[in-house]
Image (cartoon, helix red, strand yellow):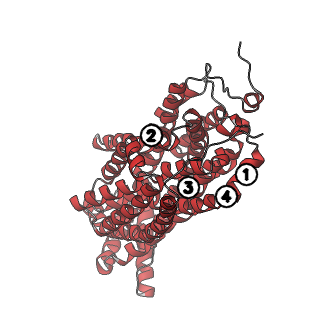
């Protein structure tokens, strides 16, 4: 009869090979990652609807989208260092509860703050999935970590494809209630709960090798390469997830089915990650990161120039090829080159990446979009439209119509006083007109004024991310050249502590 080791007792997981169903654990981990990506796609798909229904600015929507990212960082920061102690199964149970609760909060939201809190809870559940599943995959496949992490991370873009297509299908059936799109998150959530929560788990690599928490912290914070990778992770995450968060809303404002462009980007990413093995072997991890930085910059510049049509799909294709390997290869390099950092090192990478996107990149892109979109709003046409809207909606009892009439009057009054349209109040007044329930002519004209402006502002925000790609090319080029001088990329193994 097998007995549990002291480390197994400490984590609540099992390292006995006869107890662990590796195939089911890997499958369940992939489904859990689908839940995180469906949440990402769904929140992205409803951002324009939230902006109109709750009359939010781009910056407020950026904060909601950002909370759906930096909440991930909070849970990674808190729980990744505890993964060895609490066990991966315990973290996944918390993730399961978080996905259920966060979705429910957003569905009953009454305004900005409840939307923000719901997105934050969902994001914390997403972070718990990665805090548990990244070290789980590394423990299941210690001899092939970079490739298996890429194959595991197939299911982030893969889930975005599934969630995005489902959201588009609901729109095609005239099911436009954004709350129903959030229900999509619950499907993979219930599936990974069934696959994982009752299973025996292996101990993490650190526990198996007897690496103490103190040694793990020392490796993570005293290794120079770790600091380089943390800085690079802040930038790679911003390049990948910042624009991806805005693609549906920006392109939809320009008249394209933005969610389908997001599906195209992420479908291509999924296919390329699944075939990561030959690419990693041919280029090496650091060479792959260098190529990714260059292609990402080219794709983003194209997305900032073209707002619709086939050129947008071409730019999106280059962007997808560029960013697809960033996240899993960054994790693989840390796991292979700073292996004693263990679950903490992987958690710190996710924390820095998501925190940067959520707290800096997403809101900043929203702020840039607000500024540049305001510059493209035609003044005389907009003043005339708002005066007409205020007049036609004034006597309607519906609260949305009254709110739109008040917002329109306030903007016109500010224009008469200052001689310029206020920002972002003008865009908000136009959004209020669109969701007011007014005449078809009124709504169509408001959309015709605001759509091109929002599209332009969003595309310019993409351009502001491009310099990060140049900085990344310098960092990864230096690492790649160093590897070449040393005779090639070398993997370091976790050795058991004496």
What is the spatial separation of the Cα atoms under label 2 and label 3, in whole angstroms?
Answer: 20 Å
Please give the name of the residue rendered at 48% of the width and 30% of the height, measured from the top-left corner: 27
Q: Position of residue 492 (x, y in %)?
A: 60, 47
Q: Which mark is residue 223?
A: 4
Mark closest to the chain's N terminus, 1 or 3:
1
Q: Nearer the viewer, mark 2 or mark 3?
A: 2
Mark 1, Cα crowd under 10 Å, few <14 / some 14-19 / many 20+, is some
Mark closest to the chain's N terminus, 3 or 4:
4
* Residue at disc 2, secondary structure: helix
Q: Which mark is residue 217?
A: 1
**Residue 64 visible in image:** yes
Mark 1–mark 3 CB contact (< 8 Å) = no
Vertical arrangement, residue 280 with respect to residue 383, above or below: above
Mark 4–mark 1 CB contact (< 8 Å) = no
Q: Position of residue 233 (x, y in %)?
A: 54, 59
Mark closest to the chain's N terminus, 2 or 1:
2
What is the spatial separation of the Cα atoms under label 2 and label 4, in whole angstroms?
Answer: 27 Å
Please give the name of the residue rendered at 69% of the width and 34% of the height, measured from the top-left corner: 208
**Residue 436 visible in image:** no
**Quadrant of the image containing the C terminus:** top right
Please give the name of the residue rendered at 47% of the width and 56% of the height, measured from the top-left corner: 286
What is the spatial separation of the Cα atoms under label 1 and label 3, in whole angstroms?
Answer: 20 Å
Mark 4, Cα crowd under 10 Å, few <14 / some 14-19 / many 20+, is few
Image-quadrant location for residue 393: bottom left
Mark closest to the chain's N terminus, 4 or 1:
1
Q: Which residue is mark 3?
A: 354
What is the spatial separation of the Cα atoms under label 2 and label 1, in whole angstroms?
Answer: 28 Å
């Amino acid at each position: 009869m097998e007995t549990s080791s002291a480390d197994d007792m400490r984590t609540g997981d099992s390292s006995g090979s006869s107890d662990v169903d590796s195939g089911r654990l890997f499958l369940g981990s992939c489904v859990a990652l689908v839940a995180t990506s469906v949440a990402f796609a769904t929140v992205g798909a409803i951002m324009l609807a939230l902006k109109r229904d709750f009359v939010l600015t781009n910056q407020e929507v950026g904060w909601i989208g950002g909370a759906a990212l930096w909440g991930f960082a909070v849970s990674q920061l808190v729980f990744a260092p505890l993964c060895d102690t609490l066990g991966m199964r315990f973290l996944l149970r918390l993730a399961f509860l978080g996905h259920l609760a966060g979705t429910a909060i957003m569905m009953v939201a009454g305004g900005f703050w409840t939307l923000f809190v719901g997105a934050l809870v969902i994001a914390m559940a997403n972070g718990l999935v990665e805090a548990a599943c990244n070290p789980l995959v590394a423990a299941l496949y210690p001899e092939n970590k970079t490739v298996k992490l890429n194959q595991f991370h197939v299911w982030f873009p893969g889930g975005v494809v599934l969630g995005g297509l489902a959201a588009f299908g609901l729109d095609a059936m005239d099911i436009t209630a954004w709350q129903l799109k959030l229900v999509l998150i619950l499907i993979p959530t219930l599936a990974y709960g069934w696959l994982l929560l009752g299973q025996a788990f292996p101990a993490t690599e650190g526990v198996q090798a007897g690496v103490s928490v103190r040694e793990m912290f020392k490796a993570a914070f005293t290794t120079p390469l770790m600091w380089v990778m943390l800085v690079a992770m802040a930038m790679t995450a911003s390049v990948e997830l910042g624009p991806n968060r805005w693609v549906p809303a920006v392109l939809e404002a320009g008249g394209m089915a933005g969610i389908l462009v997001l599906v195209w980007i992420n479908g291509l990413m999924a296919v390329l990650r699944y075939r990561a093995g030959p690419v990693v072997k041919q280029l090496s991890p650091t060479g792959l990161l260098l190529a990714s930085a260059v292609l990402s910059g080219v794709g983003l510049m194209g997305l900032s120039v073209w707002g619709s049509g086939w050129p947008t799909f071409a730019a999106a294709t280059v962007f997808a090829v560029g960013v697809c390997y960033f996240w899993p290869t960054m994790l693989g390099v840390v796991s292979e080159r700073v292996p004693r950092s263990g679950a903490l090192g992987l958690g710190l990478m996710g924390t820095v990446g998501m925190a940067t996107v959520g707290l800096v990149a997403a809101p900043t892109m929203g702020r840039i979009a607000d500024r540049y979109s305001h510059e493209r709003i035609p003044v005389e046409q907009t003043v005339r439209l708002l005066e007409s809207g205020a007049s036609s909606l004034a006597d309607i009892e519906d609260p949305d119509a009254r709110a739109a009439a008040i917002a329109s009057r306030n903007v016109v009054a500010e224009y008469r006083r200052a001689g310029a349209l206020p920002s972002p109040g003008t865009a908000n007044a136009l959004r209020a007109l669109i969701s007011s329930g007014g005449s078809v002519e009124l709504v169509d004209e408001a959309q015709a004024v605001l759509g091109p402006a929002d599209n332009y502002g969003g595309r310019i925000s993409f351009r502001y991310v491009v310099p990060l790609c140049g900085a990344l090319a310098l960092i990864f080029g230096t690492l790649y050249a160093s590897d070449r001088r040393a005779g090639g990329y070398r993997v370091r193994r976790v050795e058991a502590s004496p």
